[in-house]
């Protein structure tokens, strides 16, 4: 079921996300845009579709998923140290009969000579007795020895099983691997939330860049009409040449802003395509990699800062990952301390050895093997103590990191909250400002037509309107971007239903990963600070 990990989690997240209702346009407009885009070979994405695609193809999420699989392999590897190991082994040897005969004759000759020499040197006998001994030692060859030949084939088979009985390192190491798995799972969830926030920000960036192109185009069209009007007035002799030149300068100063806005629009599409995992298609040429369908929503949200900070501390996978790292490091300290304890292993099995003179399977020697081994460190010149000291220092580092991560979450929530306030106030102020700038431009044009105003008044009014429209669009983008970041830092970017939770390790749903204000670095309940 691991291959459905990303898709199931994303589907659950999208169902529970509060912003889904404001993400795109209706079915009719979406289908119409899809038909237009499909005719050009350019895929069209709503916000929901972009997020779904990113969670299926984004390389950061895919790497995080593989990291979970890797930690499962670590669990299997370390757990195997405490389980039985059965190892069959065997050897087979064939020696040319000519070599076997030569080796046997050399061995027999050497042995006979050694015995004769030894007897002659040890027994201090008369010459007649020594001669008899030599006669006895070198008679005609023994028929039995001549007829016995070594087998040219030899083999032996051994099957042994080993079992760890006791040591002080394996069991803490196994517990540590489970915390490593939990850490990888929370890292996956943290990456998931980060990708959702990034896709939302980049999607809204495309929308705002497209709107800014419209603002710049409108400004260029207005300046073109102003230039044409001033040219007509100059031809009629009612205005000087300076008015025409002033209108031309204003127009050509505005065109680079339009070109920049168009380039930003293209770049923002490329950035979103990379995030959601779209490959470059040579057939599209210079066409954009995608098109987006959606608007820039504005949904004010009432948020209490204190509640948001507590919610972020309770739900952020970032903190839960740091908690898992602390718990894993505690077990690594136990692993280092366990090296002071003895290690006991047992070995048992059977062995089958071929006969020296017969290669038949029925003429073999067989038997059982049993062994118990144990070792205990008595003096290692401080090697184990040095490892314990290192692991305890690393544990202190992870605890310090966890405390700093808590403060980091508090900072990120407060920053996102402040940005939301700023953008909300900017939107409210610029809505009225845009209306007033439009009215000021209308009056400036009317005064110019009536001969009571100047062209400079019209240009200034146009600049003020352009500034107000751009500021309002940027404020809308900033608010939605800050809202996406706020949902991420409070752990509300996505909600995981039971279908996703079933894929998660059971331990990740335990109270040990409660990272609220009422727990310490190891997950134990503590008394709240008195007010």
Image: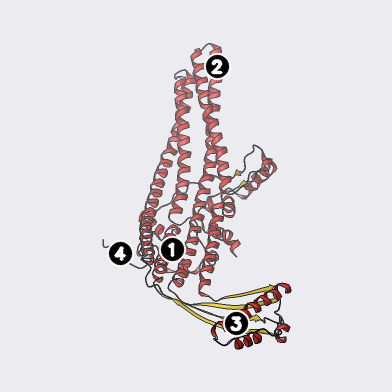
Query: From the viewer's perspective, is the residue at label 2 or at label 3 nearer?
Result: 3
Q: Nearer the viewer, residue 82 or 495?
A: 82
Q: Which residue is mark 1?
A: 324
Q: Please determine whether, in this image, residue 325 is positioned above or below residue 275.
A: below
Which mark sits nearer the N-terminus, 3 or 1? 3
- Per the model, the C-alpha gap separating discs 4 and 1 is 23 Å
Which mark sits nearer the N-terminus, 4 or 1? 1
Q: Which residue is mark 3?
A: 115
Q: Position of residue 473 (x, y in %)?
A: 48, 39
Query: From the viewer's perspective, is the residue at label 3 or at label 4 nearer?
Result: 3
- Per the model, the C-alpha gap separating discs 3 and 1 is 75 Å
Query: From the viewer's perspective, is the residue at label 4 or at label 2 nearer?
Result: 4
Q: Which residue is mark 2?
A: 231
Which mark sits nearer the N-terminus, 2 or 3? 3
Q: Residue furthest left?
A: 531
Q: Looking at the image, do the residues carrying marks 1 and 2 touch, with CB atoms under 8 Å apart?
A: no
**Residue 157 can be seen, yes or no:** yes
Residue at the location (41% across, 70% down)?
339
Q: For numbered disc 1, what is the local secondary structure?
A: helix
Q: Which residue is mark 4?
A: 528
Query: From the viewer's perspective, is the residue at label 3 or at label 1 nearer?
Result: 3
């Amino acid at each position: 079921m691991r291959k459905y990990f990303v898709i199931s989690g994303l589907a659950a997240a999208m169902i529970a996300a509060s912003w889904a209702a404001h993400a795109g346009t209706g079915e009719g407009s979406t289908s119409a845009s899809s038909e237009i885009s499909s005719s050009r070979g350019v895929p069209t994405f709503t916000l929901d579709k972009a997020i779904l695609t990113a969670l299926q193809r984004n390389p950061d999420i895919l790497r995080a998923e593989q990291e979970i699989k890797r930690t499962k392999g670590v669990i299997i590897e370390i757990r195997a140290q405490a389980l039985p190991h059965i190892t069959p082994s065997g050897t087979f040897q064939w020696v040319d009969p000519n070599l076997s005969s030569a080796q046997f004759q050399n061995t027999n000759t050497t042995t006979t000579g050694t015995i004769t020499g030894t007897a002659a040197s040890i027994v201090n006998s008369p010459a007649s007795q020594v001669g008899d001994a030599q006669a006895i030692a070198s008679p005609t060859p023994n028929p039995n020895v001549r007829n016995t030949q070594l087998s040219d084939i030899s083999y032996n088979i051994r099957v042994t099983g080993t079992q760890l009985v006791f040591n002080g390192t394996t069991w803490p190491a196994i517990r540590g691997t489970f915390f490593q798995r939990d850490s990888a799972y929370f890292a996956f969830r943290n990456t998931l939330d980060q990708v959702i926030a990034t896709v939302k920000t980049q999607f809204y960036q495309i929308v705002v860049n497209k709107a800014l192109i419209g603002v710049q185009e409108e400004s260029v069209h207005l300046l073109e009409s102003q230039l044409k009007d001033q040219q007509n007035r100059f031809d009629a002799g009612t205005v000087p040449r300076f008015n025409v030149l002033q209108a031309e300068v204003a127009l050509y100063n505005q065109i680079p802003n339009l070109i920049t806005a168009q380039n930003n629009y293209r770049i923002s599409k490329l950035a979103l395509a990379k995030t959601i995992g779209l490959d470059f298609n040579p057939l599209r040429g210079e066409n954009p990699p995608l098109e987006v369908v959606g608007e820039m929503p504005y949904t004010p949200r009432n948020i209490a800062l204190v509640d948001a900070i507590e919610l972020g501390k309770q739900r952020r996978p970032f903190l839960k990952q740091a908690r898992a790292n602390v718990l894993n490091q505690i077990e690594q300290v136990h692993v280092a301390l366990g090296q002071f304890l003895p290690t006991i292993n047992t070995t048992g099995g059977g062995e089958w050895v071929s006969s020296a003179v017969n290669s038949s399977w029925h003429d073999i020697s067989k038997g059982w093997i049993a062994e118990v081994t144990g070792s205990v460190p008595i003096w290692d010149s401080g090697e184990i103590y040095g490892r314990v000291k290192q692991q305890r220092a690393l544990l202190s580092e992870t605890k310090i990191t966890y405390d700093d991560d808590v403060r980091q979450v508090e900072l990120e929530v407060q920053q996102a909250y402040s940005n939301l306030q700023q953008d909300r106030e900017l939107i409210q102020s610029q809505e009225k400002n845009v209306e007033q700038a439009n009215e000021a431009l209308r009056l400036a044009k009317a005064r110019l037509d009536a001969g009571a105003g100047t062209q400079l008044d019209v240009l200034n009014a146009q600049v003020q309107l352009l500034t107000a429209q751009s500021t309002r669009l940027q404020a809308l983008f900033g608010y939605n971007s800050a809202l996406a970041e706020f949902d991420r830092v409070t752990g509300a970017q996505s909600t995981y239903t039971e279908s996703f939770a079933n894929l998660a390790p059971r331990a990740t749903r335990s109270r040990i990963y409660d990272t609220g204000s009422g727990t310490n670095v190891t997950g134990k309940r503590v008394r709240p600070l008195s007010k």
